Each structure stands twice: as C-alpha cells, then as structure tokens.
Amino acid sequence: MIKSAITHPPLLAALAQCGHKTQVLIADGNYACMTHAPKDATVVYLNLAPGTLAAPPILEKLLACINVESAALMACPPDFTNTIEAEYRQLLPEHCPVEHLPREAFYAAVKSDRTLLVIASGEQRRFANLLLTVAPVV
C-alpha cells in the first residue's frame, strides 16, 4: 500500500514520467480533453460528477508530488471575474508566475509535445483550466 498524497495508479504513473519543463493540465469540466490535448498525453478522469472533483484540491495534491515553476490560465473576457485564480494563487508557490494566454494560444500550449498529462476535473467554474510547468527537484 502506497503512502503518498496521491494514490490513483494511472495518475501516479503519469506523474512519474514528468521531468523538468513537462506540462500538466488540470482541465475544468468544460474542456475538451480528447480533442484539445496531445494524442500521446495521458488523460486521467477525476470528473465523477459536476463539481466533483473540483480543481483546487487536485492542484493541492499535485503540489505535494511535483514542483511547479510556472502556470498558465486561459485569458477570460474583461467583464468576467475569475474567482478560481485567487484559489490557485494561494496554493501555488509564491514565486510561481501565472500567465494569461489568449484562447488559441492556450490550446496550442496544451497541445504541445511537452504536455504529458491531462487531468479531467469536475470543476464547474469557467476559465478554470490550469496548465502547470514542472520544475526540477532541488
């Protein structure tokens, strides 16, 4: 029996393959994981039902297993208040920059060959997709 922050076997296997500069996407419930991710990426489905699992608890558990050097969110319209960003910033390391990418640039970043893992969450808030770049273990 493994004793760690994450015990989901496919998720652990995918995390074990990540190295420096690898990307991990926590996808919200609206994200098209099959068509907007690299063909070779591992897709792990944690979206049991709307709202379950939400994205912040997934991020919290990931951060117990990997270091993150940067993050990216899809830019949202100026009149949209992105409530999840503050939650992400509370969990991410203090030095971790968070970039806002236009929609198509975000999709392109996710579809790059650097993205090895896509985690489908049950997060219902819009613009909650979070693309993480793995940092080295120091």
Image: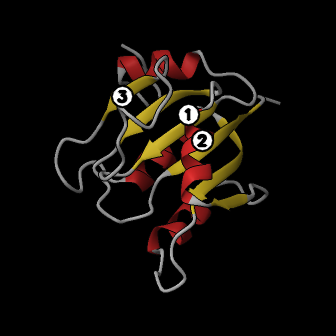
User: Is residue 5 visible to us here?
Assistant: no
Q: How far apart are marks 3 and 1 (CA)?
A: 16 Å
The amino acid sitting under disc 3 is: Val
Can residue 83 be seen here? The reply is yes
Say if 28 sits above or below 16 in the image. Answer: below
Disc on the earlier residue, 3 or 2: 3
The residue carrying mark 3 is 44
Q: Answer left or right for 107 relative to 69.
A: left
Amino acid type at mark 2: Ala
Q: Which residue is drawn at 50% across and 48% down?
A: 60
> Is the residue 45 above or below the residue 69 in the image?
above
Name the residue tied to disc 1.
111
Say whether marks 1 and 2 touch (CB < 8 Å): yes
- Report which quarter residue 23 is drawn in: top right
Residue 83 position within the rendered picture, expressed as x and y whole percent measured from the top left: 45, 75
Classify residue 34 as left or right of residue 105: left
> What amino acid is labelled 1 in the image?
Lys
> Along the polypeptide, which appears first: circle 3 or circle 1?
3
In this orientation, which residue lies closer to the viewer: 131 or 89?
Answer: 131
Whole-Å distance between the Cαs marked 1 and 2? 5 Å
Q: Position of residue 39 (x, y in %)?
A: 46, 20
20 left or right of 2 in image: right
Q: Which of marks 3 and 1 is in front?
A: 1
Mark 1 secondary-structure assignment: helix
List x then y, in percent, for residue 102.
60, 60
Tell me how far mark 3 sits from mark 2, CA to CA. Answer: 20 Å
- Residue assigned mark 2: 108
Height in image: 48 above or below 94? above
Up the image or down, 47 lies above or below 112; here it is below
